[in-house]
Image (cartoon, helix red, strand yellow):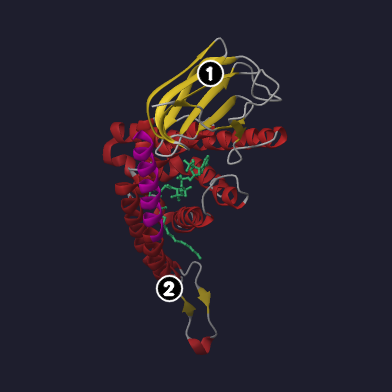
Amino acid sequence: MQTLTPAVFWAQRHGEIYLRVEISDAKSLDISVQENILHFRGQGHGAKGENEYEFSLEFLKPVKPEIKHKSTQRQVNITVRKQEHCWWDRLTMQEKKPLFLAPDFDRWLDESDAEMELKEKGYLFMYNLVQFLGFSWIFVNMTVRLFILGQDSFYDTFHTIADVMYFCQMLAVIEVINPALGLVKTGMMPAFIQVTGRNFILFVIIGSLEEMQNKPVVFFVFYLWSAIEIFRYPFYMLACIDTEWKTLTWLRYTIWMPLYPLGVLAEAVAVIQSIPIFDESKFLSIRLPEAMGSFLSFSYVLQLYLLLMFLGLFFNFRHLYKLRRRKFRTKKRKAN
Ligand SMILES: CCCCCCCCCCCCC[C@@H](O)CC(=O)SCCNC(=O)CCNC(=O)[C@H](O)C(C)(C)COP(=O)(O)OP(=O)(O)OC[C@H]1O[C@@H](n2cnc3c(N)ncnc32)[C@H](O)[C@@H]1OP(=O)(O)O
């Protein structure tokens, strides 16, 4: 087996260097940084078939000696952290670019685009942090009250929690705007269904009817909503700083399985319980001309909403299932 030099692609951010080494099914990898020189050695399938591959790169400026690498079926991805947070004019100490090195146009950004990306990540991090603090407060508060007061805590959930829930759910409208602005790589529809669905329950069904506010169902709706969010938002926060905690990823992409149907069930119970109250109070009902009867009851809208809810559940359940499969399938592939 001869030793060859693989094709290497690179891109940078202010804090990191990304290298992509074009070897598939790489084995026996030995990658290290010594005296600011990256040494790569490994076996795998490259442009000239199954061979031993190696290369060295002396970096332009100091880097941290600890590197991260992931071998996938198609390539080896290496992340090297810069010692100082700054933009480099080129990758290597030598001015002439080595022949095996080329820009990675899949990840390539120029300095101003990289600065913009940094600002976007900062904004998303802050948004997720605020939501995480809000939902954690809700979840912890409700749990503590459940332990201290037992079932009595079911009846005044709304009066203790509503202000923070209003704040978090109003802020969550941003989640529909983010994909529209291209700030997150996901579709608008799943977020729209979730935010609209929750806000309808919160502001119309519970918030506008005093008779609903001391019903135990409010406890279940709020508890189920916050139970997923205390995992989802820290997962996003870590993603903003390019960090992953495997247990958290697993929880974010798994616990929706019981929580989502239970959440929709609790919301459906709230809607059903509100129907006689809307009917009786005529609140939000439309007064009709006398010839057509007295009122067009809001309960017709609620019955239609119950149907939409289960369509929404089906749509988002399928979406979450696909996300989960994609997440764990790529993980398994990367691990091989
Ligand atoms: C015309 C009128 C229509 C009216 C419709 C009314 C229908 C009503 C239906 C009601 C159903 C809703 C019921 C619901 O309220 C019940 C509950 O919530 S019960 C509690 C349990 N709930 C859940 O488990 C769902 C929680 N929500 C979610 O999981 C998401 O919000 C979801 C809606 C599924 C959208 O997820 P998304 O598509 O964004 O997927 P990812 O999370 O994987 O994100 C994709 C990538 O983008 C990155 N990302 C996304 N958001 C952020 C962010 N804020 N900050 C940073 N990064 C973000 C994420 O990291 C992913 O990147 P990568 O792939 O690189 O990891």
Secondary structure of residue under mark 1:
strand
Q: Quadrant of residue 155?
A: top left
Circle 1: residue type: Leu
Instruction: Note whether residue 55 is visible.
Output: yes
Magenta region includes residue 283: no
Q: Is residue 277 above or below residue 218?
A: below
The residue positioned 29% from the left and 32% from the top of the image is 147
**The CB of the residue at mark 1 lies under 8 Å from ligand 1:** no
Number of marks: 2
Q: Which mark is residue 300?
A: 2
Please, which residue is most extreme toward the bottom here? 291
> Where's residue 275, x and y in %?
38, 66
The answer to whether 128 appears left or right of 316 in the picture is right
Q: Which mark is residue 38?
A: 1
The residue positioned 46% from the left and 24% from the top of the image is 68
Secondary structure of residue under mark 2:
helix
> Where's residue 70, x and y in %?
43, 30
